[in-house]
Image (cartoon, rainbow, N blue to C red):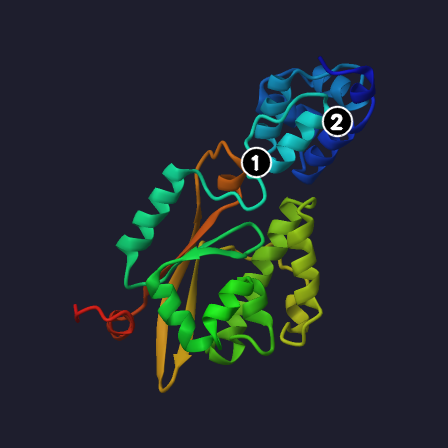
Amino acid sequence: MPTQDHRTGLYPALLKHWRGQRGLSQLDLALAADVSSRHISFLETGRSAPSAEMVVRLATALDVPLRHANGMLQAAGHDPVYPEPAAGEGLPPEIAEVLRLMKEHHEPFPLVVIDHKYDVVDLNGGAQALFGLVVDDLAATLAGGLNLIRLTFDPHGVKHAIVNFDEVGRTLLWRVQREVLASPNDNPLRAILEEVLALPTVADDWREADLTAVSSPVLPVKLRAGEQVLEFITMVTAFQAPQAVALDELRIETWFPGNAATAEACRALVGMPRG
């Protein structure tokens, strides 16, 4: 059972913080979680101590990232319920197998697996071949850690190869800004955002996200490779209803050819017969 120190300590502040981040009143949260608004009030003032089930119910209603939901459980005096990967620990075998199949079946077109910080976790042969055209010494870069945000905005990165950089840069930066607003306790992502905002490749009118702009799930990317411009449509997807922190923070960036010439170029890059 949670102790008095927990009831009057961090959990009430965290609950109020996440409710404020989501722009919900106590009544809004009560309706979303199917509890009384009086109980929400008691939890936020420390007059009541939440059970582990109640912490999870409210965190789910508030769409709190699983890593932070574990923090809320601990703040309330309970054990975490969502598995967190140990340092150096890989993905669960069944998830690793799913990703292997996805990478394989998407060949020769690029597929990149990234975490919540946009660090590259894995990529298929099509992605390695494409990135090898625009990234100097890709193998060394991957070994040192490849971050797609840094790679995009670094003046010495791939900006020179992105034909529609104004569209890609603005959209990607605003996407990261929205994610930081949605998960303000994600300090690693916030640090990357602050690092990027200091770079000269970020236009002044991109620095503050236009929250009224439509956030499309797809993004056109045009890459210059030698004399050819390859056109792609990229889409980022996530696992639905994950029950582990590693899955909650995983994203899959899938690249689709925007025209027949790009499709043929991708096949040639990986040595696949013409379609």
Residue beneath the point at 83% across and 21% down: 8
Q: Is residue 122 above or below residue 52?
A: below
Disc 2 residue type? Tyr
Which residue is tagged 2?
11
Q: Is residue 130 above or below residue 182?
A: below
The label number, if any, that marks residue 84 in the structure image: 1
Quarter of the image for residue 185 reads top right
Q: From this viewpoint, which residue is outermost toward the top?
A: 1
Q: Is residue 75 above or below residue 192?
A: above
Q: Is residue 130 above or below residue 124?
A: below
Q: Nearer the viewer, residue 103 or 238?
A: 103
Quarter of the image for residue 87 reads top right
Quarter of the image for residue 17 reads top right
Quadrant in the picture for the N terminus: top right
Q: In the shown orientation, is residue 35 left or right of residue 128?
A: right
Q: In the shown orientation, is residue 247 left or right of residue 117?
A: left
CB of mark 2 within 8 Å of CB of mark 1? Answer: no
User: What is the spatial separation of the Cα atoms under label 2 and label 1, in whole angstroms?
Assistant: 20 Å
Badge 2 element = helix
The label number, if any, that marks residue 243 in the structure image: none
